[in-house]
Structures are given as structure tokens and as C-alpha cells.
Image (cartoon, coloured by chain):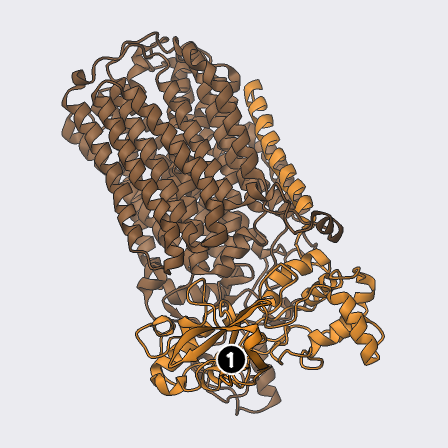
Chain colours: A brown, B orange
Amino acid sequence: MNNLKIVRWFAKRSIFVVLLVVLSLGSFLSVVPEIFAADIPVVAAKANEGATSGVELPQFESGQSSADSQLPGGQSAAGEGTATAAIEEEEMAPVQYRTFFGLDPRTVVWIVSELHLMFAAFVLGVPIFAVIVEIVGFKGGDIKYDKMAKEFTKLLSAAFATTASFGGLLGFCLFGLYPEFMGHMTNVFSPTMYVYALMFFGEAFTLYGYYYSWEILKGTAAKKWFHIFLGIMLNLFGTGLMFLTNSWATYMMSPAGIVPETGRLVSLYHAVYNPLWMPVNIHRLIANVCFGGFVVGAYAAVKFLGAKSDEERAHYDWMGYVGNFIGVGALIPLPFAGYWLGREVYSASPVMGNIMMGGAFSWTFIIQAILIGMLFIGANYYLWLGMGRIKGSERYTRFFKYLIFIIFVSFAVWLTPHNLPLSGEERAMIGEQYHPFSKYFGVMAAKNAVVNLIILATFFSFLIYRRGNKGEMCSFSEQGKAGKIGIFSALIFCLLMLISYAISLNFVELEENIKVFVKPLILSLYIQSFVVCLAAFLTFKNKGKLGQALLFAVTACIAVLYFWYYGFQVMQKANLVLRYLSVTQVSIVMSCLIMNAIIDVFMFRKAKLVGGIVWGKMPARSQYALILLCVVIVILMGLMGFIRSGLRMDWHVYGVLQDTSQWAYTPTLSYMGRIVGLIVVLFLGLVAFVFWLANLGDKKENKKTNTYEYERVTADYEGDR
Amino acid sequence: MNKSMLKITAFGIAVIGFYIYITMYVAGLSGTGSGESAGGVSPEAGEKIFWGDGQCSTCHKIGTSGSATRGPDQEGLASRAEERAKELGMASGLDYLVESIVDPDKYIVKGYDKIMPRVYDPPIMLSREKILAVLAFLQTLGGEPDIGALMKYKDKIPEASKKKVKPWVPPIVVDAAEGEKVFFDETRPVTCGKCHVVNGKGKKVGPELTGIGAIQTAEYFIESILKPSAKIVKGYETMYVITTDGIPYNGLIKSETEDELVLLKEESGEIEEVVIPKPEIAEMKKQEVSIMPGNIGELLSVRDFYGIVSFLQSLK
């Protein structure tokens, strides 16, 4: 089909598509028929709720009647004194809320902001991916990396415009539908909004510069480095933009730098650097890389499934592998970042923390567990299937059954709710409000333990995948300086992480009777430090495998088994120690992952190959695993967005500016499910459309000359892993 | 669209469909139903409001759920309400519950103070529907919910207040963060954190103050600091104990067993534990005096005083 035909085809059907979307939206959201309804002024908006703003303007004088109204600037209207004046004032009352052509504004903002956020995640995550891939290609002299990086930057430029369009729509929606709230936000953040606009220019210029200068800046190392510099600047601008918008979003959850009673700005620095800012920054940064990786994986899977030649299949199989590798790589530390964020939510507001984990939102974490479980299972399944294309990997397939068992049991524990709603009769039968057996699997101690076990199991899957076609290893002394420096660097990093935290635990301010519960944590950190040293020592003595096994075993014993048990003890006797226990657990697992990965890299660096990798020889179901990962990460993002935003309950700015509109309720899980489902369909549909648009120009060209030069079978790709 | 794209689309839609099914299933499991909001007049919605927006759990517990003691334990409330209604000559227990929420000062349970705020007024500002939902939930505590009967009381329940909240502004510029420092500053002669817990920090001698800003006003805090005995939270009344040797003690009961009584008594700004064997107790009675020192106002500067009030107000 040529381009003209495509355009005609689209034009013919577009009216039906638009109609279908409008009808679907209408029925989906159960809209009221009053389309094009007028603005809802403050009084009408509260017909059902009857509540007014929880925040008054400044300058309240003690003893003033609470019924007195105030004019802007703090002048009291009392004393104007007539009923007419009061009526006029009410008529002139500023609009707090409007509807979106009759649609519920909250749901409209929800959908638009989530779509904007998803595109933004793609636009921020993929450049990180692209620049890393470009550097790897440049340093390794492998042209296919460079081509893949460029292919994704091309998609990026098309997605960037869509992101910006959604950003504009979101801005208009917020200012139009929530004028009072946005007035507050503008009062607090207006200087940062100009910085945001300037950085947006920076991102746009570097993105287009990065893409369009790709071919021009080739040829010399200096030119290529300049091109990479542009890519890094693109990432810096993108990250800066994300950090700025994060400050607005997190301020709404944990406002700081203002006088809560009046909303007056005291410190812009504190408003930006509010308690949740940095945890959300880190969480989103890692999540964006993960998101970018899985979207790339799915793109490759779609291309693989539609490929016409073995060369194409080999290329997209390899691309899918790289996407999945980056996605899983970022997925592993994500629960740690998430835990930190959750802990800070508790610290910022225990009420919000309780709403999150023990209140209205606790059930959403069951759904989150299902989705994250699907991600880990999908990623492992893809790796296992991937071993089918590696000759020599048969040696490791016996581990699959154990890994499946570990992952599914861990998943089941993770899914176990702390408590199920019990009727009075059931409660009487049980004799307590919690189930006598399942309650032990529902608490955080158990969940933290199994999450770490899943992470260790996934990491093990990755290690055996790496080793698939590796045979006899050479002596460690043959690895030269690089091997020694690599192992030493990893060792020092791990020791610094473990020992510095162990030392800091000695100085935590706790009462003596509680502080004794910290001592086992310190001991565990020292034991792990010793084992990390031992693993490095054994590697130098050509017994790296033993070192790795030892490190795995000790980590599993401490971080999973012992901390599972000890977590219960701490919960019952010294709840305050839980936060230190979790950080200890994370540090121990991280040290295991880092040290084992580095040992594995240097141990097998010059190992003999048992067989090659037949890129492209993958069953279709492996590609569906990649697509599953992409769809699930998009759903997960939608779900977590709902949780993060919903935790504010009926507050625009938590504890400061109340949402007094009739839509200020927490949607049920099923309604949330439908809306998030709709958002995911819209996002994936739009991504497919944008990708199709981006590739439109290449179709004809590709038909004439397929420039990819890949080996069908190979060790050629061996170095990629 | 080629065959592989059709398959991919179908697969993607199946995954999203599975997710929507899971959310509906979990919604059913959690009792939040499949409607648009967790609102509406139902015991489930009311239970959420009780532990959430309504802030009821700041003062009330239900059996083993919650730990607040400012207000009466709500376990078996519906059946107790029926008994009270009979004593007061009311038609039903529901009458009593509605009246107790609409006008909290009307019936005060013996041993408790007039501290319950009007939940339809700021800062809680529950809508009529939410109050009805809470009532539906309260009906389940020792009884059966009867939404039909409940809805007949709809017009008796005021709509949420339309009064604008006039924020209390201290007479001088103070910072709540500074107030927090003073609250926990152990270098001072008296430290609030030695007796009150806020967000897990401090010692639990007096009532916990986490979330107190959501239910009490600045005026209440000022009075409580300057005149601690004016309003004593239930469960924190001072006990007056005279031993058989004639030694008198004033303090809070920390624990009590068949053999001994552990009292917390204030001595020069410090809290000390006194263990008194039960056989040695000659007399024991509740006092209308708080263990909290009455001279805190004199020990704080004006800025520190208002800083603490601002800090307490920010605890929402």
C-alpha cells in the first residue's frame, strides 16, 4: 500500500474511528447528557457536597466573625454591611471548578495527565537507552548498536511532539477546570514554571539536534563524541524537566515551604525540595529506564513477528533482547526505590501512609503485586526461552523447575493480604480479627523477604543465561589488570555501602530497650561484608563459582530467611527498627547482585564458547512475553499513578487546599481499573500510530535496499552480551 | 492490518481485559463494590470514612481495632444505643446515634468529656451522605444495618458547613517547624515530647497527638497548654493514691495488676515511675487535675509558645 492509499484509507475511516471513540468514552465514563454545560460556580458545585474550601485567604484577625467574608488582599468585606453587597460578592465569587464539556473534570485530568506522563516517560527513558547504546556501539566499533540507537531516536522525535501536545492539553485542562487550585500552584511555583519552559526549549533543541546531526557528526572520534555530548545534554534537560514537574506533584502530597493556614509562600526551595521530591525523582528515573526498555522490547517483538527475512528476525530478536535486558536491569532496583518512597510517604504523613498500606489503597497493592509478579515471571520466561537459541545452555535447564517454584511461591506470599474483611460471625469463629495462618504472610516482613527472593531468582536466571554458551574458563590471572581493578572496585563499593551503613546504625537515636534490636542488623552487615571479601578472594584463587554460590547462599539466608523471621520480632517489639531492617536487607541484596555480576563478567570474559547464539531462532511466544512485559509496565504505571495521586484523598494540596468539588471521592477499584484500562488502550494505540507515522517515510526506501548487515548465526552478537 | 498485528492487538487487549477483571475481582473481595465511587450510604463506605476522612478513629477505637481512648470504644455500639434510647425515652437506637452526631454535646457518655467536634463543620466537613454512611457502619457494630430506616433521618442531618474556615493566625510570625523543634527539645526544663507521641516520636505518657490538628482548634491547644486541667482526655486523669503508710501520690496509671499499681508521676518536669503494691494502697481516687505541669506557659517564650501551637495545628 503506498502512502497516498494509506492516507485515503485513513481519511475514509477516520470519521468512524472518531465516532467510535466518542461513543466509547461516553458509555465508559457514564457521562451525563448535559454536554456543553456551563461553568459550575462554587455554590452549584457543592450542591451535593455542601462543603467549601478548607482554606481561607490570609490575614484573619482574632475575634473576627467566622461568617465574615474577605476581599482579595485581606480587606474585610464586613462593614460593607448590606445584603446587596453580600449577594454581589457571591455572584462575583471566583469559579473554583468547571466541567469539560459536561464530563467530570477529575476523570478528564486523570486521563490526560496519565497519557502525558506515559509519553513523557517514553521520551525520557528512551534517550537514556539510546545514548548508552550509542556509546557501547562507538566504543566497541559495532555499527548495529549505532543503527539501533538512531532508530529509536527517530521514534523519539515523533513521540516528543505528542508528549508536548498532551502537556499543553493538560495545562489548559488544569487551568481551565481547576482555576483556584492552579492559582495556588502558580503563587507557589511561578518562578519554576519559567525555568520549565526554558528547559523545554533546551530539550527540544538538543533532541532535534541529536537526531538530525546523526549522519553529519560521523567520521571522526571528536565529531562522534560531540554527538554523544548532545545526547547527554538531551538527557540532562529531560531529567531536569522531570525533576521540576515532580516538585509540583510531590508538593501536592507533602507541601512544604508555605504557611499551611494561609498558603503563603515562605521558601520556594523547601516547596521544591519537599520530603517526597527526591524519592519520587529516583523512583521515576529508574522506572522510566525500565519503561523505555520494555517499550523497545515490545517494538522489537512486533517487528520480529512481522519480519519477512531471517536477517530482520535476527536483528529484531537481538533488539528485543537488549530492550528486555535494560528493562529487567532497571526493574531489579525499582522495588528498593519504591520502598524508600513508601517509607518517606509514611514519614511525611503517617495518616497518608496508613491510607496507602492499611486503608483505602491497601487493596491496590494486591493488584500491584500481581502486575509486578507478571513482570518478573514474563522476564524470566523470556530469558529461559532465549536459552533455546544458545547452544550449550541445556546444562542449565535443570534449574528452571526450581526457579519456577521459588518465583510462584514468592508471588503467592506477596499476594497474600494482611487481612480479609471478616463478618462478625467469622471473626468470632477465628477468635481474632486476622486469619491465624495467612496473617504471617500478609505482613511487610514476609513481603520484603519474598520480593528479595524473586529478585535473587531473576538475577540467577540472568546469570545462567549469560553462561549459556560459555565453557571452560581461563585462569583469573589471565584477565589482567582489568579483572583485578574490576573486582577490587566492586568490592570497595560494596564494603563502603555495607560498613558505612553498619557504622551509622550505631548512632541511631533510639531508646536503649529498642536499640538492642538494631544490633543483629549491624552484625548481619558485617557478616555480609566478610562474605563479599571472601567471594572476591576465592575469585582471585580461581574459585569464583564457589565464591558466587557462597554469596548467594549467605544473602538468601540473611536477607530472606533470617530477616523474614526477625521482621516479625521487630514488628511486635520494636516497630521503629523496621525501617533500618529494610535498608539493611536492601544493602545486603544489592551487594550480592553487584559483586556476583562483576565476578561473573570477569570470570567468563575469556571463557571458551560451547556454541553460538542463533539470533532469530526464537519461538513466537517469546515475543508475546516481550509484548506482555510492555503492556504490563504501562498498566503498572497507570495504577501507580492512581495510587500516588489518590493518596491525597479529597485534597488538592494535602492538608492545605481541599477539593470541595462533587468529584472529591476516591474511585472504587473497579472504576479505577476501567479508567486505567482505557488509558492503556489509548496510550498503546497512540504509540502504535506514532511509530507507524515515524516509519512511514522509510517504507519505500526499505523495500529497495535493506541495509542491515547481520550475520544469521552468531558469535558475531556474542560480544553484545 | 496484517495477521500478526491482529494477533498482537488481540493479545494486548486480552492482557488489559485480564487486568480489568482482576480489579473488579479484588474490588468485590475488598467490599468496595463495582460502582463509580466507594461512596454512597453503605456500611462499607461508612467504615472507610470512620477510619479515614471522618477522623473518627482519632478518638474512638472498635474493640481491638485502633487504640484511641479519647472517646468511648465503639464495639457493640448499636446495642448500647438501643439501651440508651430506652433510658432516654427515644423511639430507637438510631435516634440516639443520629442525635449524638448532629449535636455531640447532647448526650455525653459518663466518664468522657465534651470534646467531639461537629463533623459537618470545619475542619472535618463531612457531607450528609458521608455521615449517613458512617451511621450505617455504626449500625453494624452490635446490630444489623437498616439503610431504609436510616434514610428517614436524612433531613435531620445538616449539610456540610458552608462557613469558610478562618484560619487561626498567631499574633506574631512563627514557624511550625521551629515549634516542632521546641516540642521535642530535651534541653529545656519541660519538653512536650517527653509525654506526647507525634508520628512515632516521643514518649507515650499523655495522649498521642498524631493527627490532632485535624480535629482540634488552635484555641483548644492554647487552653490545653496554659490550663492543662481544663479539659483532660479520657483515660489520662490523675489518680490520687494514699498508701497505708499515709504517703500520697498523684500520677497516671501506667499499668495495674492484681498485685501492684504502677503510677507515672511528675517530679520537677521529669516523669518517674512509682510501683505501689496493692495491699499497701489505702485509698485511690480520680482527680480533676492533669499530670501535665501547669506552668508551661511561664517556661516558654511567646514565640516558642505560638510555634508549638502552629506545629500542633499542622498535624493533620
**Count of labels shown?**
1
The residue closer to the viewer here, B222 or A627, is B222
Residue A143 falls in which quadrant of the image?
A: top left
| Residue B195 in sight here | yes
Q: Is residue A381 left or right of residue B95?
A: left
For this rendering, which residue is in front, B243 or A22? B243
Residue A33 placement (x, y as % from top left): 70, 54
Residue A120 sits in quarter: top left
Picture coordinates of residue A117, whole percent (x, y): 45, 45
Q: Residue at x 53, y 45 (%)?
A: A443
Which x, y percent locates residue B88? 81, 80
The answer, for residue A1, to whether it is visible in the render is no
Q: Nearer the viewer, residue A259 or B45?
A: B45
Residue occupying the point 29% across, 32% down: A531
Quarter of the image that includes the N terminus of chain B: top right
In the rendered view, tell whether residue A27 sits above or below residue B92: above
Label 1 marks which chain's residue? Answer: B
At 43% from the left and 23% from the top, the residue drawn is A300
x and y percent of residue A293 in the render? Answer: 40, 31
* A573 over A591 or under it: above or below: below
Name the residue carrying label 1: B166
Q: Is residue A14 left or right of residue B248?
A: right
- Seen at 58% across and 23% down, the residue is B6
